[in-house]
Image: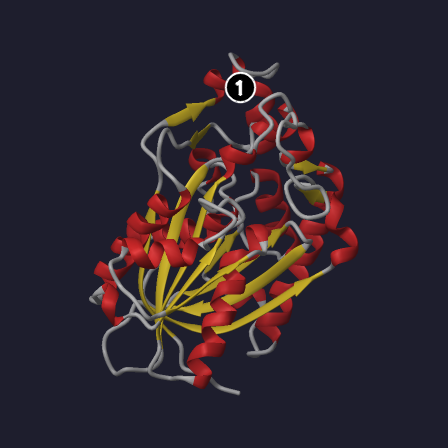
Amino acid sequence: MSINVHIKGLGHHVPEKILSNQDLEKIVDTSDEWITSRTGISNRHIVEDETCVDLAYEASLKALKKAGLEADDLTHIIVATFTGDRPLPSASCLLMERLGIKQKAAMDIAAACSGFVYGLETARAFIALHPESKILVVGSEILTSRVNWKDRSTCVLFGDGAGAAVLTGDDGAEHDGKLLDVVISADGALSMALAIKGGGSALPYHLGDNVGEEYFIEMRGREVFKHAVRNMASISKEVLARHGYTTDDVDVLVPHQANQRIIEAVGKKLSIPVEKVFSNVSRFGNTSAASIPIALSEAKEIGAIKEGDLVLVTTFGGGLTWGSALLQF
């Protein structure tokens, strides 16, 4: 089924405060050399008093401005996050209120780092049913709220930020690009490889309880690396093949910015030259659901993505979840 889905505008926003590897040396037993050599990360932006919705709001305003639309033009708001302001209400409803609009469809998506790509597929479904839709898809995370700062294997990886995209059907107006296709997948049997075990109904909060390690991100790094590289590469080939493309046709690969080793391994497995692989993980760290939209927005802004480029997006996250999207700019 052919669906005309246009990318009207992209935007991203990160907190002003930067946490460097040198700063982390004062917090946990680590070093700049250890972090850089294993992850490729030098800095990450972290919140001081902002919330997930604050970041989402700023990114949304930028995307709307580039799209040439007002907030009230929107029909749907989709927010991908697992670090929303509150368990209830949803981040999407709070974002709608911040944008000053009412009576729009609003929903959150919980697919961890794959959340934005899952949001793109959800938006495609809405537009297929309602071609007049104008949909805001946001990935926004405050990972530092769920980081165990005593766990040096994970706390060095994550940063905070938000990215947004405005998607529409074919309205005859100018647009940045076209969303050609999305493929998404998951495997719940691998759920404990990357998880936050505490705080849900299986391990709920109780008044007076101490907060333990189970309330923060836990990851089996080697296992996640193996599945991430394999599945990101496999699903990328799948979405390309559906349109008769090969990796040789790809102008820019935008992978989830998990760490530099994964980014390089995915590029190598897809036989895409390193100069065609976009990476900003050194400056932002892993921002989970915000990673892909921040990367797309920045790449477009600095000219790393140019008019006419075929862009392949691929992602992987807790769940385990993964997905790939194909965009034509």
Picture coordinates of residue 163, whole percent (x, y) = 39, 51
Q: Mark 1 points at which residue?
A: 32
Q: Which of 214 and 267 is in front in this view?
A: 214
Q: Nearer the viewer, residue 215 or 241?
A: 215
Query: Tag 1: Cα neighbours inside 10 Å, few (<14), some, or many (≥20)?
Result: some
Give, as a three-letter code, the residue at label 1.
Answer: Asp
Image quadrant in which the C terminus is located:
bottom left
188 w.r.t. 224: above or below: below
Report the residue at 76% width, 43% height from top: 223
Q: Nearer the viewer, residue 245 or 99?
A: 99
Quarter of the rendering containing residue 133:
bottom left
For residue 204, say whether it is visible.
Answer: yes
143 w.r.t. 104: above or below: above
Find the residue positioned furthest to the top.
26
Q: What element carries label 1?
A: helix
Q: Which colour scheme is used?
A: secondary structure
Report the residue at 21% width, 65% height from top: 70
Find the residue positioned furthest to the front.
207
Picture coordinates of residue 47, whole percent (x, y) = 39, 32
220 w.r.t. 235: above or below: above
For residue 277, say whether it is visible.
Answer: no
Picture coordinates of residue 283, whole percent (x, y) = 42, 34
Report the residue at 42% width, 79% height from top: 127
Picture coordinates of residue 244, whole percent (x, y) = 57, 79
Quarter of the rendering containing residue 73:
bottom left
Quarter of the rendering containing residue 147:
top right
Whether residue 182 sits left or right of residue 251 in the image: it is right
211 w.r.t. 30: above or below: below
Find the residue positioned furthest to the bottom.
1
Q: Nearer the viewer, residue 241 or 17?
A: 17
Report the residue at 67% width, 50% height from top: 228
